[in-house]
Image: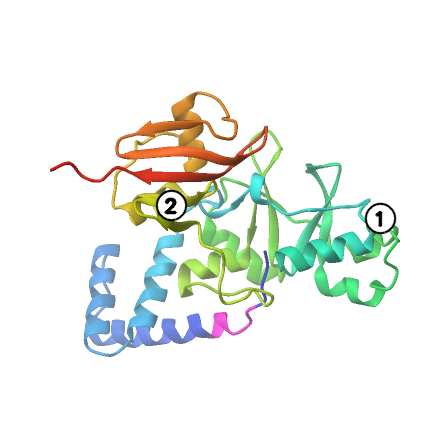
Amino acid sequence: MGSDNPSTPSLLSKARERLMRSLLLRGQPSNRKELAKVIEQASQDDIINEDTEDMIRGVFDISNLRISDIMIPRSQIITIDQDSTIADAIALIKEHGHSRYPVSLEDKDHILGILMAKDLLPIASQSDHKISEYPYLLRKPVIVPETKRVDVMLKDFQKNRFHMAIVIDEYGGVCGLVTIEDILELIVGEINDEYETEEEPKDIVKAGDNAYLVNGTTPLSDFSEYFHTQLPDIDVDTIAGLVIHLLGHIPHKDESVVFNEFTFKVIKANQHQVQQLYVTVAPPTE
């Protein structure tokens, strides 16, 4: 949920220098479309390499995005309650492997500050003490609206030297979280957190002939791409949201619903969310 990557700005600077050399050779483009052609031609002429081209296009892409498009949604934010013991906080950090965590008072709408995992090391032996006994460990949370542009957010991250921000909706409620890593990955590709293992759990796992285990949080776009299918254009982001939409309620374990060639069976759920599904795909008819 956070990662320091000081070398990335220098990579972007080098990409910018190479692009400027290409622009000087070809004359200044008059619009975005012409600039895209210059970038493509510069790559073909080996003035810039493929990675640099991807980074430049990534910079273009983020200028069209809002924080709400890339944030970690509220349901997936991992927080540490201020009344947690040091031992409990360390156990949670070991389980999730991030470097920064919001510390909350009772619920996610009341974020007191940001705790860096490394700051617990000096007090790790005080295992029975509560996080609330060490308020000086918390960094002031940065609050941003979900409508903020991603490129502006990146500039704020770089200028003010912070790495995580809490995202709020128009009513002032916490709706998500964004890190500098989330934005940089749009430009330079995936960046592993310093505590992440190389092999991350997969959202979709084959479980037999035409059968799959699918995490409820799997984005609809990932599901569509994996199965080469077109899902309905509805106002949900995840496969769990689709199932809830189809059923009209939050389903219990073992409930199922059929949509096109897919049968979705809920195998893990609680009263608030669908966590895992068993999905079978009907073979195409002759």
**Viewer can see residue 132:** yes
Q: Which residue is mark 2?
A: 212
Q: How many marks?
A: 2
**Viewer can see residue 238:** no
Q: Secondary structure at mark 1?
A: helix
Q: Position of residue 86 (x, y in %)?
A: 81, 55
Please give the name of the residue rendered at 54% of the width and 58% of the height, measured from the top-left corner.
180
**In what quadrant of the picture does the N terminus appear?**
bottom right
Q: Position of residue 173 (x, y in %)?
A: 62, 33
In the image, residue 58 sits, relative to residue 226, either above or below, namely below
Magenta segment range?
A: 5-10
Q: Position of residue 198 (x, y in %)?
A: 50, 67
Is 123 within the magenta? Answer: no
Q: Secondary structure at mark 2?
A: strand
Please give the name of the residue rendered at 31% of the width and 29% of the height, measured from the top-left corner.
259
Amino acid on which the number 2 mark rests in the picture: Tyr
Earlier in the chain: of badge 2 and badge 1, it is 1
Q: CA distance from mark 2 to mark 1?
A: 43 Å
Which label number is shown at residue 132? 1
Is 8 within the magenta? Answer: yes
Question: Which mark is in front, 2 or 1?
Answer: 2
